[in-house]
Image (cartoon, rainbow, N blue to C red):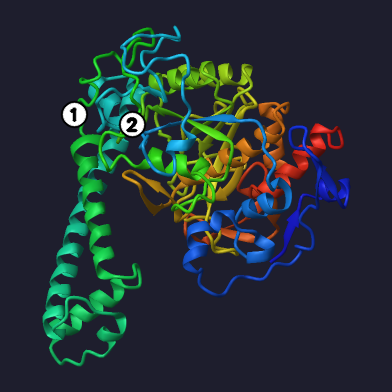
Amino acid sequence: MTITLNRTILAVSASILLYGCGSTALVSTPIENIDTVPLKISELTEAEKKNWGHTDLLTDTIPGMSVDKAYSEIIGNKKGETVIVAVLDSGMDLTHEDLVDVLWVNKGEIPGNNKDDDNNGYIDDIHGYNFLGESYNEQLEMARIVGKKLGDASLQAKAKSDLDKDYQKALQNKGQYEQILQAVQNADEEVKELLGKDSYTKKDLTEIESNDESMQRNVSILMQMLSIKDTIPEVISELKDGIKHFSDQLNYNLNVDFDGRKIVGDDPYNFDDRGYGNGNPKNRVDDESHGTHVAGIIAAKRNNGLGANGVADNVEIMSIRAVPNGDEYDKDIALGIRYAVDNGAKIINGSFGKAYSPNAEWVYEAIKYAADNDVLFVHAAGNSGEDLDDPNNPNFPNDQINNGPEIADNVITVGALTSKYGSEMVASFSNYGLINVDVFAPGDDIYSTMPNNEYDFQGGTSMAAPAVAGVAALVRSFYPKLSASQVKAILLNSGLTTKSKVVVDGDASKAMDFQKISKSGKMVNAYNALIMADAVSRGKIKL
């Protein structure tokens, strides 16, 4: 397998100067000699698992973004300008040890006085705004369309068909998970009793000699589970999480009679009904961890001895709570984007998406508003393993209609990579598309911040988008005169690519050219992005 660096960079110069806010120039060299990179055979170490998205393909044979290399060889101790990045997501832990020092603070607002001190239209918005009020569980948009009879008959019929299929699938999956959990728990208890131990290893299982068919079945079940997770308690925890997920789908997401919005008090389908929500964008329950995890990927304080390093230093995170446990409302997203723009964000991360968007025009106008104000919008491609260029697989919000021309040049849609360089480096869940996905970045099993000062691994294009938002923040920090569209072009053009085929949708029969599953055909690379940004800023490269 060969990897090809964008040759425009290599043609610029063997050494390129990076200037940091009036400081002495730092000499840097683009990544070279990567025409052949060996496949990584050994398992990732624990340290590599927690940091693989920051590794360097040439040095580590892991398809990371060369973040650590960018800091050690280009940035060093240089300080750029502070960049405000809005995390348009679920609520986040505003007191997390690795995030508390990087929160955006609205200096024009006096905390807790129940007044709009800065006259921005939002009361007590110290660290951002909460468009969900005290709500958390929500329907998917298709359930709302069916339950509220939104749109025309054709839209309602399609939503009803999809809803019925998803409901039956969730019901079936819940039943299967419950059966597997019961079998694992029974096997676990019987093996513990046989061994006289409270815990055991794979080796212990292989040494069990029994003619009892029931015990043989127990050993087989547990060995199969240990091929998925390292320990049975982890397996049981994951199964319980799965059961909760499918229960939430049945009780809330796919339930046409559920009304999660009632507590908020607004009409979510009336764009002029404003003044709802509150100034506290903190997570409401521990399970509401998504926004905290995303924020940590972007900007968890680097090298402070705590659990995770974010991609970008010199960032302030603005928390905008607009994504519930279910589908987000178009109104909340449109107003959230406008809030971020009006309050100084230069990058917005949107790690969310849905298949139906009855008021998509509100979001399109907000994206255009962000473009007009030089704000970059980074969006997750979605986790259905689908080709988004197929009109049957929409993922809102997007930046075009029916694969037509882009409505604005400030949106980057991101697919997810795994840590396994080679044919399986595209995450099985990641959506893709030559038109509708712009670039790929690390998104599978990413270690980051969780509520209550905890850390854990999560996977999804939701994790790939903030990785790219972090690189964009690095570029905007050191090159603040570059526009949002220029930063987008730099990230798309400076990445690494491969001429080889990769598996998509986890299906070996669906091997595709990596260069044909996104618009750029590349993986984002922070090291090269900074080098190209410098060249663009000095007129050495014209985009």
Classify residue 147 as left or right of residue 153: left
Q: CA distance from mark 2 to mark 1?
A: 24 Å
Picture coordinates of residue 263, whole percent (x, y): 21, 21
Picture coordinates of residue 133, whole percent (x, y): 28, 22
Q: Residues within 10 Å of mark 1 (few under 14, many from 20)?
A: some
Location of the C terminus by quadrant is top right
Picture coordinates of residue 371, whole percent (x, y): 61, 21
- Examine the rendering and report whether any part of residue 358 can be seen: no
Give the number of the disc on residue 282: 2
- Examine the rendering and report whether any part of residue 449 can be seen: yes
In-front residue for pair 492/484? 484
What residue is shown at x 37% (from left), y 34% (from top)?
Answer: 94
Which residue bears the numbered disc 1? 258
In-front residue for pair 284/174? 284
Name the N-terminal-most of marks 2 and 1. 1
What residue is shown at x 46% (from left), y 35% (from top)?
Answer: 395
| Callouts 2 and 1 close, C-beta under 8 Å | no
User: Dot 2: what SS?
Assistant: loop
Picture coordinates of residue 268, whole percent (x, y): 32, 17
Q: Residues within 10 Å of mark 2 (few under 14, many from 20)?
A: many
Mark 1 belongs to which amino acid?
Phe
Mark 2 belongs to which amino acid?
Lys
In the picture shown, does residue 147 fall above or below 542? Answer: above
Q: Nearer the viewer, mark 2 or mark 1?
A: 2
What residue is shown at x 47% (from left), y 14% (from top)?
Answer: 108
Location of the N terminus by quadrant is bottom right
What residue is shown at x 20% (from left), y 33% (from top)?
Answer: 255
